[in-house]
Amino acid sequence: MVDYVVYGRGSFNQLDEIIAPHRKDGKPMIFLVDHFFEGKPLLNRIPLRGNDKVFAADVTYEPKTTYVDQLANHLKNEFGSVSGIIGIGGGSTMDLAKAVSLMMNNPGSSADYQGWDLVKFPGVYKAGIPTLSGTGAEVSRTTVLTGPTKKLGMNSDFTPFDQIVLDPELTVDAPVNQRFYTGMDCYIHCIESLQGTYLNEFSKSYGEKALELCRKVFIEKNEWNNESDDQLMMASYAGGMSIAYSQVGVAHAVSYGLSYLLGTKHGIGN
């Protein structure tokens, strides 16, 4: 589970204070930010210190192992090591941040670690800040990557974020279609978890709450409002917790195939 969770409107403003204890002398914090935010006000709110760097994460396509390796090798060559990786964006950006963090301390290619408990060493400090709600990437123990031969996660106890900041205000400018399809990822997580053969009471408790929140947002409401953003962000968290303690089902399995062969976006594929 994620060690430290901060939730609430405006909580992004606490980021400087939150990451301060994890800074190491002379080693930068690296902010991987969804390229959607290039030229937008959010970039000016990132608390840069010293030699910190912001990288625009190109998530036009879902993360590839080659892109993870490229970023990690660039950081190693430029800085040697870093204080941490902060992922700000949707599920693809957060998965990218988790994977780069792991590859800062593990040898070889990220493709070598696509599977279950193959990661040998903890990554550098990593924090996730979702700007879309639904994937559950902020709490999951996997980072789903498209490799040279398969689309599969780096599933390990070292994969979850050390810290997440859940600020519903950050989702307000999300495009309507993207918001819907990402929200559907959460809804489908819940269906698969609650109908799956790996279901247990821990998973069931989170899955039922997430499904209840999804239905409030997508079925009971006539229009989107601030409460919808709050509810879907918590549905994403609970849905991610539910799936982490059970398993995804056939919808996700088919979606991975569509993504690998055709480049279909994850939420649409589901």
Image (cartoon, rainbow, N blue to C red):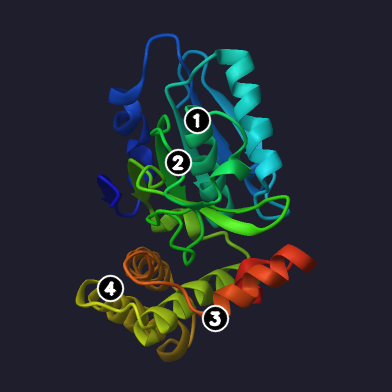
Label 4's element? helix
- Judge from the rendering whether residue 103 lies leftward or rightward of residue 234; answer left or right: right
The residue under label 1 is which amino acid type?
Asn
Label drawn at residue 106: 1
User: Is residue 183 or residue 258 the one in the foreground?
Assistant: 258
- Residue 33 location (% of width, % of height): 58, 41
At horizontal 58% and vertical 19% (from top left) the residue drawn is 76
Q: Looking at the image, is mark 3 or mark 2 nearer the viewer?
A: 2
How far is the residue under mark 3 from the one under mark 1?
31 Å
Work out whether mark 3 precedes mark 1 in sequence or the reverse, and give the earlier one.
1
Label drawn at residue 250: 3
How far is the residue under mark 1 from the one under mark 2?
7 Å
**Disc 1 and disc 4 in contact, CB within 8 angstroms:** no
The residue under label 2 is which amino acid type?
Val
Query: Residue most toward the left?
Result: 201
User: Is residue 263 among the parts visible in the rendering?
Assistant: no
Query: Residue most toward the right?
Result: 262
Work out whether mark 1 precedes mark 4 in sequence or the reverse, and give the earlier one.
1
Work out whether mark 2 precedes mark 4 in sequence or the reverse, and give the earlier one.
2
Work out whether mark 1 precedes mark 2 in sequence or the reverse, and give the earlier one.
1
Query: Residue most toward the top?
Result: 26
Label 3's element? helix
Give residue 204's quadrant in the image: bottom left
Residue topped by disc 4: 203
Residue topped by disc 2: 119
At horizontal 34% and vertical 30% (from top left) the residue drawn is 19
Work out whether mark 3 precedes mark 4 in sequence or the reverse, and give the earlier one.
4
At horizontal 72% and vertical 63% (from top left) the residue drawn is 260
Q: Residues within 10 Å of mark 2 (few under 14, many from 20)?
A: many
